[in-house]
Amino acid sequence: MGYDDYQCMDANGIREDGRKADEMRPVEIVCGVIPVADGSARIKWGKNEAVAAVYGPMEAHPRKIQRQDRAILDVRYNMAPFSTTDRIRPGFNRRSREIGKVTRDALESVVDLELYPRSKIRVEIEIICAEAGTRCCGITAASVALADAGIPMSDMVVSVAAGKCNGIVLMDLNKPEDNYGEADLPMGILPATDEVVFLQMDGDLSMDEFKQCWDYNVKAAHDVHAIMVEALRTRYGGEV
Amino acid sequence: MSEDSTPPEQASGAVRLVHPGERIGGHDGAEAGHGIRRIDGELVAMRMGTLQENGQTVSVEPLSSRYTPRAGDLVIGLVEGMTNNIWFMDIGASFNAILPMSLAPWKVEFGAVREHLGVGEAVLCRVQEVDETHSAVATMKGMGLRKLKSGMLETIPPHIIPAVIGKGGEMLQTLKELGDCRIVVGQNGRVWLDGEQDGMREIRSALKLIRDTAHLPGLKERVAALAGE
Amino acid sequence: MAIPIIPSLLRKSLAEMASTDERIDGRSRYEGRNLEIEVDCLANAEGSCRVRMGDTIVLAGVKFQLMTPYPDRPTEGGLMTSAEVRPVCGPNWEAGPPSEESIELGRVVDRGIRESGCINTTELCILPGEKAWQVIIDLFAISDDGNMFDAFALAAIAALRTATVPAERFDVGEDYRLPVKGTPIMCSYHKVGGRFVFDANKREELGGDERIHITLGDEGHVHSLQKGLRGVFTATEFDEIMDQAQSHCAELREIVHNLEDSL
């Protein structure tokens, strides 16, 4: 199928996976899935599945990476070899490196790093199964894992990606929409204030379309945030 | 050594669970305590935990945390390394503590630190001081402070310590009787047990029970039931 | 992997417990931890399995690729096993190139499966000299609480035996179940407190000595062996665990077969 052939929506405005333009894929989150970690979470988002583990805060080694005034976040994003239809060869991957870096930039914006000088907090994100929006799954799972580990944060980062396909602005792109679409806008939002800590974009969007994508992301972020909070409350004996 | 504090589940009234980023309304003029920060005039919870209101201070009792050393804390440390005149100790905090030669209980010659305390050994020591970069200095000069040569170590999350000790040391006494062992609870969540194998095993089961169910009411009864078995 | 400090009290405790035939988590000497196993759990893999032994959790994914047969073996496809133990699974696993530990893990699991002959590489041939299947088993650790060898080996064989060859996607025919003859199973024994135990957890590994991995096939034949880490063992000790392996492997084999029957 070529790029011009894909139809993201039928005559009734229904997408291939049964959703309307402004609907999200189903999201499930569970905490504490990695028993040996200080904090962890698993997220299932559509067909995506990701886990995040947090270790620390711990002494930062080697000494040269230590910062005297605050902790450092050591973030890794990785896709398992079996996560995609075509196997991914294990090893250094530039895309994964970049995603790890922007994830760190997002999380550092909320974590109270000054509380733990000279230490480091490890955040390990692994994509087990991929279906568009893996970096968003990763950031979201990492936020829950950090909360699970008791790391102080001013808010939890929720990440979602809206975009455009066949000229229609869509919430939470799925795989064919991401592959054959015209634009992709992943964001990381702080639900208490709607402030942004993560932002990337590629493609072609008019200013109106851009604003619509932004609004979709903010709305979706609030919905996902409720699921994150529920997961944490369940973990900690939520009969309270 | 023991901390006289009320375990979370015995606090009166409804317990409110808060998450990082949650805005805490209705406390005008209140002070921001541990785990709470004032952002743009609002009180914001910074951690996952239970909201505590003590007079004019609002704070969060964390449900998961890393030990933060404070001067005076009794801790159980594990030696990770050494130089000619100091030992580096893992005390389960975000940063290692140092034990200088001058604060050891033995007369140590420069360069001979290894002879007295080696890598992997456990000691009962006290946090002497903590500077603003969270560097902790430990001391072994003090009553009861010593190298631990027998028994075994268990680890519990620091926020469970009050439940393990109990009101006025009640729970700790129950555990000691349960296993007929010596028990020392370090503020860093490390627990030292010393006694017969059977007894230590009983206590370890009880510690696991406390760790898993401390937040639910009826803890005393559950642990007492173990003793009855 | 960063070398963890081994608390000296731990070794002492383990030795004391061993003298009264006890283990740190209350199990008996040859008792395994609680086992959970699930296949078909990875949507983008052609075969998959998730194994949980106590708090050790691993995934195995089977994927197929097309390959050109080697000139000296024109009618054969290939089988490859790759193990990734990433920092996600434990505080002591570091980022970077594969550690010796993870390389050993992958290769030992691979040998057990390969030497059992359960995969016949000539059956992987599509067009002699031109096209054949390469079967790749990717082992992925999620949580390391000890004995990843057995968890990986079990996940690998269960994933293989429930894998589907994706012929349609590669336009070479209809999808079919991968033919796997036999069910090689690995059982590992770790010397803790001076004697071998089955399914060691992390603390036992930390305070223990050497380990031995035994892979047995359906008829109880030995297909691979490996001794790792520092320590010595006698022929008598080895006989005893070989005996145990016969029954342990048979039990695990039955679990895999029951799983397949329930699909």
Image (cartoon, coloured by chain):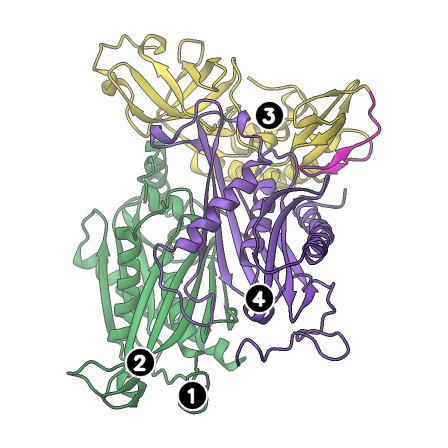
Residue annotated with mark 1: C171
Verify CB contact (< 8 Å) between mark 2 and mark 4: no
C-alpha span from label 2 to label 1:
22 Å
Q: Is residue C156 visible?
A: yes
With C175 as the anchor, is B223 left or right in this view?
A: right
Residue annotated with mark 2: C119
Circle 2: is it few (<14), some (14-19), or many (20+) Cα within 10 Å?
Answer: many
C-alpha span from label 1 to label 3:
72 Å
C-alpha span from label 4 to label 3:
62 Å
Chain on which label 4 sits:
A
Q: Residue shown at 49%/26% (left/top)?
A: A70
Please name which of the two marks, 2 or 4, marks the residue nearer to the observer: 4
Numbered circle sitting on residue A178 = 4
Q: Which chain is purple?
A: A
Residue B208, how many percent across, how many down?
A: 56, 41
Three-letter code, disc 3: Gln
Quadrant of res B18:
top right
Name the secondary structure under disc 2.
Answer: loop
Three-letter code, disc 2: Ile
Residue C102, how many percent across, how many down?
A: 31, 55
Residue A236 lies in magenta, yes or no? no
- Colour chain B appears in: yellow
